[in-house]
Image (spheres, rainbow, N blue to C red):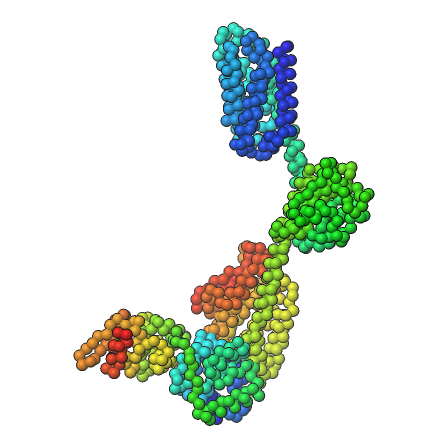
Amino acid sequence: MIRTLIVDDEFHAREELESLLLETGEFVITGKCANALDAMKAIKKEKPDVVFLDIQMPVIDGFEFLGMIEEELMPHVVFVTAYDAYALKAFDENAIDYLLKPVEKDRLTKTIHKLKKSIDAGHRPAIYSNPEIKRIPCIFHNRIKLINVSDIEYVRSSQAGIYVVCPPGEFYTELTLKVFETRTNFIRCHKQYLVNLDHVDEIILHEYKQAEIKMKTSKLVPVSRRYLKILKEKMAF
Amino acid sequence: MHVFLHLIQAMSIFIVVAYLYCKSPWFKPLTTESLSSKDKIYLYFFFSAISIMGTYMGLPVQDAIANTRAIGPVLAGLIGGPLLGTAVGFTSGLHRFSYGGFSAFSCGLSTTIEGTMAGIVHLYLIKKHRSESIFDPRIAFAVAFVGEVIHMAITPVFSRPYADAVELVKVVAIPMTVSCSVGAALFVSIIRDQKNTYDRIAAVSSGKAFQIAQRSLNILSRGINQQTATDLAKIIHEETGVGAVAITDKEKVMAFIGCGSDHHLPGSFIASPLTKQAIYENKVIFIDGIDNQYVCPLSETCPLNSVLVVPLQIDDEVIGTIKLYEPRNTRFLNINKSLGEGITNLLSNQLLISRYQMQKNLLLRSELKLLQAQVNPHFLFNSLNTIISILRNDAARARDLLIHLSMFLRNNIKRVNDISTLEEELDQVKSYLKIEKARFEERLAIEMNIDPNLLKQKLPTFTLQPLVENAIKHGISNMLEGGTVRINAYRLNGSTFIEIEDDAGAFQGEIGNGGLGIKIVDKRIKALFGNDFGTVLSCVPSELTKVTINVPMEAS
């Protein structure tokens, strides 16, 4: 059975796809999400084998969404869309397959065949060669707030999750530190911290090779011994 | 008595001069409303000459001259104002002074005073908005009369010996006063009559031109073809009264009305070398029938012998000609010649405008087609997908949605009329929203607040649809939590306002087709109702995007 996540902003589209997938008897539906943020959460939690992904979605479209998922969690991707203007791009993104709505059963059978082949062969899902992430979706008062990467001072991880810190405050995000590390220009300075060098004021060196980063807003970010050397190199180029 | 007769003789010469003047091209300025400085300089020379002539043609009386010098400055002052009057008076006065004699100074002075006085009367009449009285012979008479009385009064004051001056005045006072006053009055009355004739001719010809223009413009807006050309030729023929009128394109005669129509047949190729020349050289050709004869190339018995050929052009490109003919026994009137040229120019302009309008309409139409063609695969397939899904659980609803979808599609394809009522527009929008509501379910709320009195309001077809589509496509569908589309229609200050708003507030400058859609709607409203109407877009980011349509209210 293939563990599957369905992501589509339209309710009936999710229902229809779920029915179609269940009818084949090949799938377990681990979740149905109406937007990219919920989908990110579901992927982290359920780690599905495959995601059936709509491209046109509010705020963060399917392509941008894939750029925000870290490599280890990346499922296989089948794009499902109403209109084939995106077909070429979808295949550039190395999707396993590309379905048009309304989805036809025979066509879906082919998709299943491809999927199974890939999974059985133990192929890792393709890496999405997305360009740098420019904006980070955060949750703020139950609404989604998009924060420009350049406005973020640093990112920290805590028991409660990942927070981006910027001058107006801290915001919770579903993105992982790993994603920040690989898809933005932020530098790791601590196991739990990534820092945006553009906002750094100075590095304060203490005794015993201890150090702290002072941001331009005077906020202090811890630097662990392990990353200090790398950080110094980066700062001096 | 001798003096009197002599002065009447001199005065008569002035009347002849006045008559000749009125027939000369230098008279032209007086037919217009205001005089340029150049005109005034001409008038200065003319009236100074008249005045000096008055001195020369005077009769020597007792070492002085009985004369009609006063007529010049009085007329100059009345027609041209104080400056011109004084200048003429002073010039002529100076001349008289140089002539010598015991009354030289008083004569010179009084001539100047008369000019100035007439100028003051001119100013007074202008100020009282009675400028038409400037050419009133009674006023001229009165001014000359008073001027001469002053002249006579100051002669004994400044001339020595006093007794001689009194004696002189006794002899010349009555003849001079009478002849100057009558002379000035007659002179003015000749000018006035000639001026009226000019005005009347101008009025008649501009009246004709207006008639033709008014009657022809409507016809031309239908473009130029055999039918409209015939209608046009009829109008020109009727209004000008010329013998015959023809309209050609570059190759053929499109219409011929009037005498000679038995052998000048519409549809035949242009036979006249004159017409070909007019087309080829893009110039007006006139054969007056006196020095040159028009010889009909088609028939020896053709009665026509004078012709005016005026090229009809669009954008400097000749597209045909308009021809006016007169038969052998009728002179080709100048007024018809200028009318013919004027009308052709007017028609050329009109053709240019209607071609421009046509192109503009074509452009709008093709843009509209584009907009319609955008019914938009994304919407269509998502709708079908939605309906297929609903079909699993609720066949009745699926059926209802399919009917709305077909209505929507049919309307999109079949609505060919350019103008719809608000009601028709709303029907289309309702079908559309019904489907979108099914797609987005609770993410889409719809509020309509329509003044029922406005349902018959006329709008360009496809005014609402693109705007509502924008509100959903670029607005609501991009909101995670969903939003509301509102459509309001109300009256305010004699206009009808229709608002389409969404609470996404996502509009940023030109969003692809969103921007284009609004622009086309705006253009089409302006094309239908004029530039005072159209669409206005306002946006509060993340809160509201609102398009307000403003159209004139239907008379109910």
Residue B325 percent coordinates (x, y):
74, 43
- State whether residue B148 appears in this view: yes
Quadrant in the picture for the C terminus of chain B = bottom right
In the current view of this chain or complex, which residue is farthest to the right?
B301
- Determine which quarter of the picture holds residue B225: bottom right
What is the total number of numbered labels drawn onto the structure image? Answer: 0
- Determine which quarter of the picture holds residue B300: top right
- For the point 23% across and 82% down, the residue is A225
Residue B282 percent coordinates (x, y):
65, 47
- For the point 63% across and 55% down, the residue is B355
Q: Is residue B290 left or right of residue B40?
A: right
Q: Nearer the viewer, residue A30 or A225?
A: A225
Q: Nearer the viewer, residue A136 or A98?
A: A98
Residue A220 percent coordinates (x, y):
25, 75
- For the point 44% across and 65% down, the residue is B540
In the current view of this chain or complex, which residue is farthest to the left?
A207
Up-down relation of residue B215 to residue B205 (above or below): below
Q: Nearer the viewer, residue B553 or B375?
A: B375
Residue B322 percent coordinates (x, y):
70, 47
Q: Nearer the viewer, residue A114 or B495?
A: A114
Q: Is residue B130 left or right of residue A151?
A: right
- For the point 51% across and 69% down, the residue is B471
Quadrant in the picture for the N terminus of chain B = top right
Q: Is residue B481 left or right of residue A185?
A: right
- State whether residue B340 appears in this view: no
